[in-house]
Amino acid sequence: MTLVTGGQAIVTLGGYQESFYTLIAGRFFLGLGAETLMVVQSVFITKWFLDGGLMQFATGVCIGVPYLFTFSSGFILNWAYDKVSLGFAL
């Protein structure tokens, strides 16, 4: 969780500074943390829902909800960038 939060903080800092390399470094740490969380989430889903027969549904929800928010953030971030600034949008 610390890698995700720290990576997002670095991305935001890179947005305020308008530094491409800082943005890339932040995305690197964000990706490391997010991938680790996905593995842990898959382990928890397997342990919790294996016996009940709802594992496919739980896995689908855990994969689908982030995609839904990623899709909607494309609209929200464009609005925030147009109205405020790049750093605020990130």
Image (cartoon, rainbow, N blue to C red):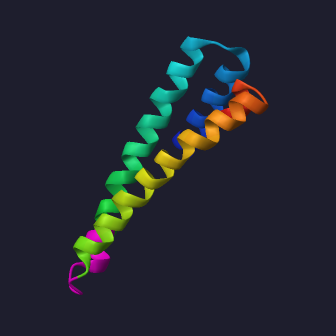
Up/down of 69 relative to 15, above or below: below
The image quadrant of residue 20 is top right
Left or right, residue 23 beside residue 13: left
Name the residue at 48% across, 46% down: 70
The image quadrant of residue 17 is top right
Name the residue at 21% across, 85% down: 51
Residue 29, given in percent of the width and then of the height, sits at 49, 31
Left or right, residue 33 beside residue 86: left
Residue 86, given in percent of the width and then of the height, sits at 69, 25
Marker count (numbered):
0
Q: Is residue 52 magenta?
A: yes
In this rendered view, identify the residue nearer to me: 12 or 77: 77
Up/down of 27 relative to 62, above or below: above
Q: Is residue 29 magenta?
A: no
Up/down of 39 relative to 60, above or below: above
Q: Quadrant of the C terminus?
A: top right
Residue 2, given in percent of the width and then of the height, sits at 56, 44
Please give the range of residues in magenta. Answer: 45-53
